[in-house]
Amino acid sequence: MRIVGGRPAAEGQWPWQVSLQVEDQHVCGGSLIANRWVMTAAHCIYGHLDYTVKVGGLHVYHASKQAVKVPVRDIVVHQDYNSFGTIENDIALILLEFPVNYSTYIQPVCFPEKTFMVQTDTDCWVTGWGKLREKDPKEAAPELLQEAEQKIIRHEKCNEIFKKKLGTRLDVVREGCVCAFNDLGKDSCQGDSGGPLVCEFNNTWIQVGIVSWGIGCGRKGYPGVYTEVSYYKDWVIDQMSLASSQDSAGLPTLPLCLVLPLGVLVTL
């Protein structure tokens, strides 16, 4: 998915945003959650391709002093990811070949505790290098990172919206998802998949969603659907811990910025 109706982001505004690339071509977004870990959508992973991650720059292709390209060592797709019918468990973790150095332009996004529930109508932001219009050709994606404001819809209400719109009795938006929309038609689109939906709480940016799917891009009455990050907190920690215990080089302990329900910041 891509950003429709958004605007170019300011330098250093979203320092966790990454571009997941294959053969130097952008395929999906993602977010830096630790110095060797990136989170993205499971549907962004197409088997054993040679992925790289670009982090630290507004430009998706042009080189800059701030940006770094890092090879991917390993990828973990959620074991229960399902793309047949209803998309479920659309989350994956990427282990980088080496840790990135934090700077003004490279920072991890904070991760919510699993008890954290973002409320309806919360103002949030989605970012990415996806298409600017639904019918744009694939190569029309922007060079500059785009941003767009969104309002949250909880999955229960979002599911009712989709059932009514699609004329179905099936639950198409289930637990583990959260939705977001903008009355002005701002939305994510192809190329934004795997990227972050972030909200600011107590002067801290927290990732609440991963761009997953939608009906078209920016269509009136159709919210975008995101993987709800807090729902998968335990899975993420388990995968990072497992990788750390298996790595002969001794991966660092999990420098994951967790945000507790009361907004108390802790670092593991």
Image (cartoon, rainbow, N blue to C red):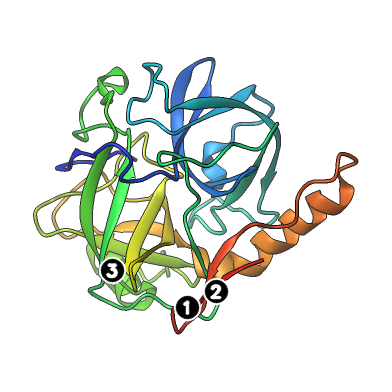
Please state, as top left, top right, bottom left or bottom right, where the N terminus lies in the image.
top left
Locate residue 121: give its quadrant. Answer: bottom left
Q: CA distance from mark 2 to mark 1?
A: 5 Å
Q: Residue furthest bottom?
A: 262
Alpha carbons under labels 1 and 3: distance apart? 14 Å
Farthest residue to the front: give it: 103
Residue type marked 2: Glu
CA neighbours of label 2 inside 10 A, class few (<14), some (14 to 19), many (20+): some
Q: Disc 2 marks which residue?
A: 113
Please name the amino acid that badge 3 sits on.
Answer: Ile
Residue at 31% over, 45% down = 127
Q: Quadrant of the C terminus?
A: bottom right
The residue where tag 3 is placed is 152
User: Residue 145 vs residue 248: left or right?
Assistant: left
- Quadrant assignment, res 201: bottom left
Q: Residue under label 1, please give it.
A: 116
Q: Residue at coordinates 77% horizontally, 58% vertically from top-left? A: 241
Q: Position of residue 231 (x, y in %)?
A: 54, 70
Residue type at the position of mark 1:
Phe
Report the side of 17 relative to 149 (left or right). Answer: right
Res 166 visible: no
- Label 3 to label 2: alpha-carbon separation: 18 Å
- Disc 1 secondary structure class: loop
**Is the residue marked by circle 1 packed among few (<14), some (14-19), or many (20+) residues within 10 Å?**
some
Q: Earlier in the sequence, mark 3 or mark 2?
A: 2
Q: Determine whether label 2 and label 1 are within 8 Å by CB.
A: yes
Task: Please tell me whether mark 2 sits on a helix, a strand or a loop.
Answer: loop
Of the pair 44 and 100, the residue shown nearer to us = 100
The location of residue 140, given as percent across then percent down, is 25, 21
Above or below, 233 against 63 in this view is: below
- x then y, percent, for residue 200: 32, 66
